[in-house]
Image (cartoon, rainbow, N blue to C red):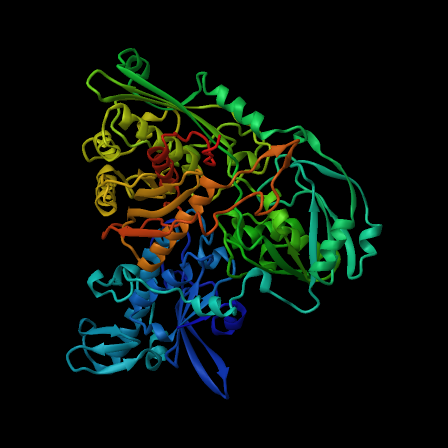
Amino acid sequence: MKSITHPEKTKENTRIYKPGRRDFLKLGSLAATGLVLGVNFSCKDRKKGGEVTTFTANVYLSITSEGKVIITAHRSEMGQGVRTSLPMIVADELGADWEKVEIVQAQGDEEKYGNQNTDGSFSVRMFYKPMREAGATARLLLIRAATQQWGVPEGECSTDNGKVVHKTSGKELGFGELVEAAASLAVPEIEEVPLKDPSEFKMIGKGMPIVDLQDIVTGNAVYGMDAVVPDMKIAVIQRCPVVGGTVKSVNDEAALAVDGVLQVITLKGAGIPPQLNKPLSGVAVIAENTWAAIQGKKALDIEWDLGPNAGYDSEKQQQELLESTKNKGTVRRERGDFDQALRGASKTIERTYLAPYFAHGTIEPPNALARVQEGKCEIWAPTQHPQFARNSVAEALGMDVGNVAVNVTLIGGGFGRKSKPDFIVEAALLAQKSGHPVRVQWTREDDIQHDFYHALSAQRIKAVIDKDNKVAGWNHHTTFPSIGATSNAEAIQPSDGELGLGCVDFPYDVPDIRIETHDAKAHLRIGWLRSVSNIHHAFAIGGMLDEIAEARKMDPVANALDMLGADRNITFTEEMPGGKYENYGEPIENYSWETGRLRQVIERVAKNSGWGKEMPEGYALGFTAHRSFLTYVACVVEVAVDDKNRITIPNVYYSLDCGLAVNTDRIRSQFEGGSQFAASLALNSEITVKDGQVQQDNFDTYRIVRMPQSPQKIHVDIVESDAKPTGVGEPPVPPFIPALCNAVYKATGKRIYKLPIDLKA
């Protein structure tokens, strides 16, 4: 198995043209969006004095006369294994020899590849069927080419290990021997193309190691910071410390005196709102090397106009938001009559929950290399969203989008940060202004202090228990600055999409429910971070359910199962006045909310963790279950708390139902990494703002989990299913945090209502 990183190395192997109607291969769900992919053609490539014929059945797949199968990975790889899992689907359906598969990273090109935004845990669920259809179409063409030579029915032939096989006679022809004949055939209508029975899969549903593993562990992998072109210069930027501020004046004399510094260029920001794809106001130092650029940046003398956010204090805003939850809010979901439930209450429980801003803290800070020449721009960047980057660069430079090329490198951690192309636009603008290829390099301090932050939040939940010890009422108030405010300063309420991340989709069978929101103004750049609003919503709901169990004198697992009620499918929309349940962008009829699937993972995790067993002093188990990104997850966290209030995590148990598990190795890896990520948020991470400026600036002040705090053993149980695949990158995070907090309570007697956890407070 060989992985090809650079798309430009294989450009000569393909020739994309605008095909006629009969030439189109329509790929499943993509065609439904109006995008049709794939053409049937061949071209020639000179190699070692001879000709190699390449048959390209569609934009994802080419086969050479040497028997090499080249599969295009059109999504971005950041450790989640998408450069393995999606090509693996194509190869399995095709019947390829995995050892003869090469993977090419696609450039950003919406016309060819459709949506390339690698975010929201939807790569596999969106492209599972189209990728199968791509492989199946090529398989059918190869079989037809073979049957023309053999004079046998198609139904007697199959593919295996890079060959077409005639089952009756045992005849075989390698893919390479058939490419010329296959290239001459008409592409079949998708309705003609049979998909394999899942019992025939050799890779799908198995644990396949990532194709980039060898390059990564040997240092040969190409990340954004590894990209180099001739005459490249390095830029670092001193950005305004307050969002919305501007440069009043700059004295660059001392900076230009630093050996190796070439230019100082002022960048104009978008102001307020700051936008997702615009640079912040700042002053860039361009130099021959990174060290000189950093020293030049330190030598700058800048006077800032800090703008309207100069007096912003995050602690003060959070308390104001919390106070607002005491008032009536905007009703976003209502079932029954909560006030009536309250009047009939035997017990009421009312609790508040606070979570801070979080930064992404990716190990590879943002960076991008841009070269502008002859009216064109070429980018090399660790981007999750190459098309957004391409369009944003074209707009910033005043170019036609066809003159911008975005090469996607491996990503050293994304979590949603690198889907925003502000840092890529910075590089393009500086390359255009300076006349040199420029790589913009963010420092760790830049990254922590100028992120698109996960919003701080305040929540108030009131639960009603009636005289029969049943949960009769649920009133949830939530407030946090919306991601929408980064693009629209008037957005002061959370969107339906943000509320659909663990809030309005409260699945429990409570007769009277009211969910309310409150205004919250944004003073920083707010963006999506791994699992987004599920983080704070699950924290609050998971903690409250544990308290409800205690009030009802029930075991927390038994309480959750009781509250779920009878197995059923839920739609939510009819209870959302003027709103819509987004369901992660999928029609509810295609991906229904099934409480029976949540019940199953709860029961499984209880069994696997030994829930209810006796624990040594200072040890305890905590539990939460949560559905996010269409995946059902139950989590049990074991904690140990010593006499100095130090928390360690000996074991984490997950049970999950993600539909068909395409690559179990990557699923387990995502849940292992997700628990570490969530442990950071719960135990250490916090962004605070004073006078409009972020107070943290590196991993000593914005701490991510260290080895002693890291979960020591992570047990991942995957439900076998033939349902449609769902997301796995983000679902590990939401249930972990409340499960951890509930375990801490069991071990110490202290409830956690504010993140990060502080047992000394």
Q: Residue 498, located in which quarter of the rendered image?
A: top left
Residue depicted at 39% across the width and 23% down the height: 351
- Residue 158 point in image, percent of width and height: 23, 73
Q: Residue 579, located in which quarter of the rendered image?
A: top left
Residue depicted at 28% across the width and 69% down the height: 140
Q: Is 266 drawn above or below residue 41 in the view shown?
A: above
Please tell me which residue lies in front, 194 or 549. Answer: 549
- Residue 45 point in image, percent of width and height: 48, 79
Furthest residue toward left:
168
- Residue 14 point in image, percent of width and height: 47, 71
Asked whether residue 398 appears in the rendered view, the answer is no
Please tell me which residue lies in front, 163 or 612. Answer: 612
Name the image quarter holding the N terminus: bottom left
Q: Is 386 drawn above or below residue 161 in the view shown?
A: above
Please tell me which residue lies in front, 369 or 260. Answer: 260
Asked whether residue 102 appears in the rendered view, the answer is yes
Furthest residue toward top:
343
Q: Is residue 440 left or right of residue 52?
A: right
- Residue 452 point in image, percent of width and height: 56, 42
Q: Is 387 drawn above or below residue 245 in the view shown?
A: below
Furthest residue toward bottom:
49
Q: Residue 744, located in which quarter of the rendered image?
A: top left
Please tell me which residue lies in front, 529 or 162. Answer: 529
Q: How many marks?
A: 0
Furthest residue toward front:
643
